[in-house]
Amino acid sequence: MKKKQIAILGSTGSIGTQALQVIEEHGNLYEVYCLTANNKAELLAEQARKFKPAAVVIANEGRYEQLKQLLSDLPDIKVYAGAKALDDIVEAGPIDMVLTAMVGFAGLSPTIHAIKARKTICLANKETLVVAGELICQLAHQYRAPILPVDSEHSAIFQSLVGEDGNEIEKILLTASGGPFRLMTREQLQTVTKADALRHPTWDMGAKITIDSATMMNKGFEVIEAKWLFGVEASQIQVLVHPQSIVHSAVQFRDGSVKAQLGVPDMRLPIQYAFSFPQRLPLSSERLNLFSHPLEFFEPDLNKFRCLALAFEAIRQGGNMPCIVNAANEIVNRAFLEDRCSFLQMSDVIEKTMQRVAFDKSPSYDTYVQTDAEARRIAGELIA
């Protein structure tokens, strides 16, 4: 059987490295066609040596010569650099699937190019649907490009809907770990540090997503994603704080029945399911033992975690407002990691940016690009 050719956008990050583990475990089914990274030239070169892709792309053009030198003895691997190279490579004819594991707004353009090239999209880049959900869904329908969710929560919803074609969703139950600050008061949050925020209780993720989890903006983004992926309104999505991260999410149907997907916290499972859908392949992972795990659920505190409330407000307004929230969040997230912004200041800056950036109810792609730039500028000024 012909192996599926996979392009991994963001191969040096948490999702990308785990995706390579899945490919390695099922080398008879999958082959890496392309690997990309933003800055980590050394790790990208190391991955290229192991998986022998046809091409590698480093987004930061300043690292191109370094990467080319690191792979100079492997002339069969083509080396490219820059944003346009990312857009171009996903259109390559042999590619069957594109795993979009890049972080941030930068993932939007190559995802659009992959959709227009009719590739199957394994979506791990939240910002694509957060920023431009309506546009992405329209393009996916137009070019008949399947979008398979990789986030554990959306994969759980997707898995719960298999076999339920035509059955109306009454409610989506989107679970959240609550992050490291679940039990803290708002007063205590005034003095937390990035080191505190980076200690996630259940998941091993990159720094940006870990901070977003601590503020619960990550969950707000997932609410926006769920709206577009599953065709529901925000009012049909309920966030449940579930510290054990065993129930990855659930769907409630109009007869009151609830279907959920459970498992140990292991991102390889949703990655592999997206690759193999509709089949389930063996996975060498820990098995869930329900006797050793209590299952607890709590309502999120929207006064304490203002970012989640702001995400719901962005959905309510629609248009380019989610794009504004995403851009401001990327700025404050980086500022917090660089000790230029306090934990609680992040939501304050995002809210003020939402009030100042020009609102557009029916944005085009160009509007999203302009909105992103304007929101970043304003958020940066508010921090400075």
Image: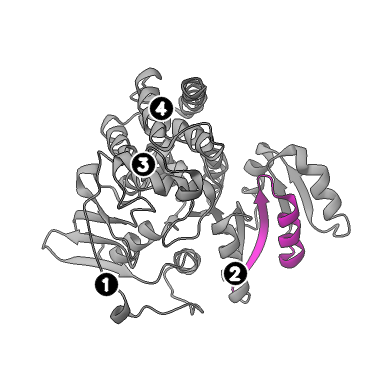
**Closer mark to the observer between disc 2 and disc 1:** 1
What residue do we see at 86% from left, 50% from top?
69
CA gap, disc 2 and disc 3: 37 Å
Do the residues under discs 4 and 2 have CB atoms within 8 angstroms? no
Q: Give the magenta-colored segment's residue range.
A: 29-52
Foreground pick, 295 / 146:
295
Foreground pick, 40 / 253:
40
Q: Residue 165 sits in which quadrant? A: bottom left
Q: Which residue is mark 3?
A: 189
What residue do we see at 44% from left, 65% from top?
270
Q: Secondary structure at mark 2?
A: helix
**Closer mark to the observer between disc 2 and disc 3:** 3
Amino acid type, callout 2: Gln
For the N terminus, give its image quadrant: bottom right
* Crowding at mark 2 (Cα within 10 Å: few <14, some 14-19, many 20+): some
Q: Which residue is mark 4?
A: 349
CA gap, disc 2 and disc 1: 30 Å
Identify the mark at residue 294; answer none if there is no mark.
1
Q: Secondary structure at mark 1?
A: loop
What residue do we see at 37% from left, 72% from top?
263
Foreground pick, 183 / 206:
183
| Among the two numbered marks 4 and 2 on one chain, the one whose residue lies closer to the N terminus | 2
Q: Is residue 159 above or below residue 381?
A: below
Kindly tell me whether residue 224 is visible in this rendering.
Answer: yes
Amino acid type, callout 3: Leu
CA gap, disc 3 and disc 4: 16 Å
Residue 360 located left or right of residue 39: left
CA gap, disc 1 and disc 3: 27 Å
Where in the figure is residue 267, as x and y percent of width and height? Answer: 47, 64
Q: Which residue is mark 2?
A: 21
